[in-house]
Image: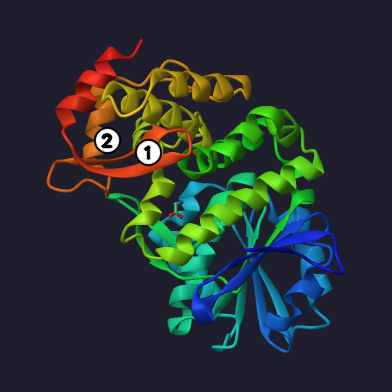
Amino acid sequence: MTKQDTTHPHKIVTVALGDRSYEIKIGAGLLQEADKHMAPFITNRHVIIISDSVVGPLYQDALAASLAPTARKVDCLTVPAGEASKSLSQFADLMNDILALQVDRKAVLVALGGGVIGDLVGYAAASLLRGVDFIQIPTSLLAQVDSSVGGKTGINAKAGKNLIGAFYQPKLVLADMDVLSSLSAREMRAGYAEIVKYGLLGDASFFEWLEQHGAQVLAGDLDALSHAVMTSCEAKAAIVSQDETEAGKRALLNLGHTFAHAFEAEARYDGRLLHGEAVGAGLALAFDFSTFLGETTSQDAVRVKSHLKAMGLPYSLATLPAGRASEETVIHHMMKDKKTKDGALTFILVKEIGAAYVAPNIPTDAVNRFLKDQA
Ligand code: GLY
């Protein structure tokens, strides 16, 4: 559900979850006006803004100063930038640091950063004093269109990524288009892959729009960018409203991700391969695999790959920036993924662009033959 805010030039998407419903506000200048947007949630309350060592210095002080007149007290905490901050030990440090600020159950955590900060702070909010309110201010395109929306929070374990966590919804998401101007072209492309995903999984006309306007989105054109973020958030909100805890339909959001997670595991999360880049190649392979299984036509796969290529994203095993992934290791990592059941693999496959579906029990043999086939 979308409406135009009458007083300010931004869009609002509502995630409809009964008494846990919340708004995602999308537009330019939201961070500057954060006090106004956040007032209903922070008035006379203790606010703790948690950011990382890259994003914090850019926005944390200004945000704290603007919230100070409304909040009872504002504190700032910073964790090291990077995936390592989603470890159990960093989580323990963060919880102790928050508790050292003598918080009560009316405290509000603010996640100011990309996906790592959103996941970590969301899980901290879910756990702190058995649950306190939190607000997401995603500062990467990827976080704005995916991880800040829908309430998946969590940290990593030795056995794998995101294995410790909770479904815990924020009270508000502020997706400020201005903060995206500090991102590199590579980070923008990585976020864009998740945007393409929404067109491919359920909205062929959005994919068509992206084919025409993708370059403007990547160039940071405000209208194109906010339309792409809004459409992505609407798509995600609609799915999450129907299936918050991934009992069914929410799994569609994993289109391309079974392959992507395997590529990331092979690249050992060392920065050579961004999550969104892995998703780009994963989307292409999801279409190729669906073609291999006779589920879709090769024309759609060609169209998807040609768009990913035009946008500068990986679109095959061979174009991954971390180097070509070998089929043996891809299979090995897929089998270890938490979404495998009894040795069989669950894939999100496609009938055509805009029509994805969940396919459980795909034999590993078929995946093996498909991967061996890849040029
Ligand atoms: N990123 C997939 C989901 O939120 O379900």
Residue at the image position 46 percent from the left and 24 percent from the top? 300
Residue density around tag 2, few if under 14, some if 14–19, many if 20 or more, within 10 Å: some
- Which of these two is toward me, 86 or 195? 195
Residue at the extreme top? 375
Quadrant in which the N terminus is drawn: bottom right
Residue at the extreme left? 342
Q: Picture coordinates of residue 93 (x, y %)?
A: 48, 67
Residue type at numbered disc 1: His
Quadrant of the rendered structure where residue 157 is? Answer: bottom left
Q: Is residue 285 above or below residue 123?
A: above
Q: Which mark is residue 261?
A: 1
Whether the residue carrying mark 2 lies under 8 Å from ligand 1 is answered with no
Quadrant of the rendered structure where residue 101 is? Answer: bottom right
Q: Secondary structure at mark 2?
A: helix
Q: Secondary structure at mark 1?
A: helix
Q: Picture coordinates of residue 284 (x, y %)?
A: 44, 26
